[in-house]
Image (cartoon, rainbow, N blue to C red):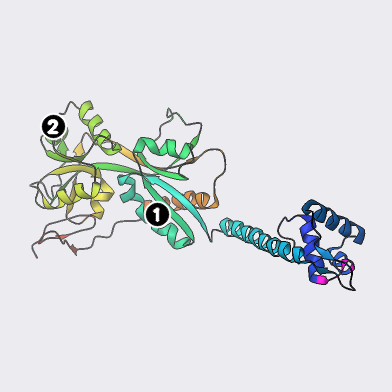
Amino acid sequence: MHHRVIFPRSLQYLLAIAEYGSFTRAAEALHVSQPSLSQQIKQLEESLNSTLLDRAGRTVRLTDAGEIYLRHARRAWGELDAGTRAIHDVQDLSRGSLRVGWNPITDYLACSLLVKFNSLYPGITVTTLEMPQDAIETAVAEDRIDVGIAFSRPPTPDTRQSREVETEMLFEETLCLAVGNAHTRAGQKKKLSAQELGRESLVLLNSEFALRRHVDWYCLEHRIAPRIAIETDSLSVLIEMIQVGPLATVLPSSIVRSQCGLYSIGVSPGLPRKAITVIYRKDGYKSPACLAFTALASEWAARRAEEIPVRRLRPCPLSETYCHNEEQVPTKA
């Protein structure tokens, strides 16, 4: 009989007596005195107001009440042992759960991070929750999610740190004007001025999104009245509209590079740089899955910075053109 599980001493003694059929042999196996063992069993019987053991014969055997009670005791022992194994499984990351909060921009930018995490820890159940940028930090602080991935301004020496959450920057992103094959500026290398940006017909995310607020701040700073043709709450819809139509938008450069049929155009003065950050609780319990995820996020960001986009022609399903992963030059098929 093993003792990995904390279990009431009297029940351990009852299980031993049932196994060995003797107070003496049970006491020897448990390395306790027989009087101590007998006293524990007596107190257990008194607490249940029932006789559990028949002591009349040469061997001690369970009464009917003892059989029933021991059946439940063994079941309880098994459940506690399973609980102990489950804790060990959580600690060695063979099982567990992770709640990740992000918004559509970080969804696109960090999806490969979740794929990598799943490949390393397939027993961890990952739940992603899409939420507004401003809600991510609050959700982490209130323990409604384990970790958040945010799209925000890069931290500065004057940035005020929250008392409840820790923020770690993974990498910075540059914003650019994004157009598709149907746009007259497709493939343009020359940067646009802020005033030229103001004359573009744009499709943008609505004002609930951090990216939209960054664009609005830029326009306000440079006294631009943007021509917003369409607003949407779906990044996928926005990207598809740019791919097939003549409108433009503002996106992180890496998203533009990853999408077939999109072209990035710089703007001068430059659009603001934004940081992709991971957010987790500063104090309190952090699950092994949360700790593993934040560690992997740092490694993933470092490798990402070292990767150089491969220039490779691939057919674009949306038009009769071929596009590069990094530089896209329209070429008739």
Residue 154 seen anywhere in this rendered image of the structure: no
Residue 333 seen anywhere in this rendered image of the structure: yes
Q: Specify start and end residues of the magenta stretch as a single range.
A: 20-24
Label 2 CA crowd tier, 10 Å (few <14, some 14–19, many 20+):
some
Q: Which residue is mark 2?
A: 195
If the image is split into quadrants, where does the N terminus sit? bottom right
For residue 102, side relative to residue 330 (left or right): right
Label 1 CA crowd tier, 10 Å (few <14, some 14–19, many 20+):
some
| Residue 23 within the magenta-colored segment of the rendering | yes
Say which residue appears at 37% left-offset and 41% top-offset. 150
Mark 1–mark 2 distance (CA, rounded to whole Å): 37 Å
Give the camera-side residue of 233 and 203: 233
Say which residue appears at 68% left-offset and 61% top-offset. 72
Q: Considering the numbered disc 2 on the image, is that residue within a helix, a strand or a loop? A: helix
Q: Considering the numbered disc 1 on the image, is that residue within a helix, a strand or a loop? A: helix
**What amino acid is found at the position of numbered circle 1 in the picture?**
Leu
Quadrant of res 248: top left
Q: Which mark is residue 113?
A: 1
Q: Earlier in the sequence, mark 1 or mark 2?
A: 1
Quadrant of res 175: top left
For residue 318, side relative to residue 124 (left or right): left
**What amino acid is found at the position of numbered circle 2 in the picture?**
Gln
Q: Is residue 168 above or below residue 33?
A: above
User: Picture coordinates of residue 157 (x, y %)?
Assistant: 43, 30
User: Picture coordinates of residue 120 (x, y %)?
Assistant: 47, 61
